[in-house]
């Protein structure tokens, strides 16, 4: 069973948002297909976010979340999500299943300064 609240620490590497999670055997795991644009919006007010920031996320809402991603469809083992506020779609690769047992219908996120 996954935790309700999870955290990763994304950073910019060679022009791409990535994160490491040794416990889940992930190194420089990239965000792709619309997710980088979402991260750029989430971090616009975080000084030096490119060097790293805290990303909290959960399948349930939590106080002061910034983003509500709504499940759209499965594709290539990953899942597309929609951020209504900015009319953006993004694809989360199969690495998301290292955090969630099943495909969440919604994912809530917040970016914070480290």
Image (spheres, helix red, strand yellow):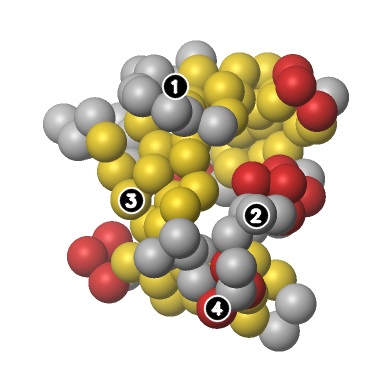
Question: Label 3, label 1: how many angstroms apart (C-alpha)?
Answer: 16 Å
Q: Tag 2, which secondary structure?
A: loop
Looking at the image, is mark 3 or mark 1 nearer the viewer?
3
Looking at the image, is mark 4 or mark 1 nearer the viewer?
4
**x, y (%) of residue 107?**
48, 27
- Tell me which residue sits at (59%, 42%) in the image: 92
Question: Label 3, label 2: how many angstroms apart (C-alpha)?
Answer: 19 Å
Cβ–Cβ below 8 Å for labels 3 and 2? no
**x, y (%) of residue 18?**
56, 68
Q: Tag 4, which secondary structure?
A: helix
Quadrant of image for the C terminus: bottom left
Which residue extends farthest right?
87
Bin the neighbour count of mark 1 within 10 Å (Cα to Cα): few under 14, some 14-19, many 20 and up.
some
Q: Earlier in the sequence, mark 4 or mark 1?
A: 4
Question: Label 4, label 1: how many angstroms apart (C-alpha)?
Answer: 29 Å
Relative horizontal placement of residue 77, taking residue 25 as reference (left or right): right
Tell me the tag on residue 7: 3
Q: Earlier in the sequence, mark 3 or mark 1?
A: 3
Question: Label 4, label 3: how many angstroms apart (C-alpha)?
Answer: 16 Å
- The image quadrant of residue 20 is bottom left
- Tell me which residue sits at (40%, 38%) in the image: 57
Q: Which residue is mark 1?
A: 104
- Tell me which residue sits at (35%, 23%) in the image: 62
- Tell me which residue sits at (63%, 80%) in the image: 13
Tell me the tag on residue 51: 4
Q: Earlier in the sequence, mark 4 or mark 3?
A: 3
Q: Tag 1, which secondary structure?
A: loop
Question: Label 4, label 2: how many angstroms apart (C-alpha)?
Answer: 14 Å
Quadrant of image for the N terminus: top left
């Amino acid at each position: 069973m996954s935790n309700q609240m999870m955290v990763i620490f994304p950073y910019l590497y060679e022009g791409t948002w990535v994160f490491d999670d040794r416990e889940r055997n992930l190194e420089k795991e990239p965000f792709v297909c619309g997710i980088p644009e979402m991260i750029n919006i989430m971090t616009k007010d975080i000084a030096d976010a490119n060097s790293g920031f805290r990303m909290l996320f959960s399948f349930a809402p939590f106080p002061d979340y910034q983003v509500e991603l709504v499940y759209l469809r499965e594709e290539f083992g990953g899942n597309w999500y929609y951020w209504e506020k900015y009319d953006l779609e993004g694809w989360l690769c199969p690495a998301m299943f290292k955090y969630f047992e099943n495909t969440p219908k919604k994912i809530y996120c917040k970016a914070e300064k480290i």
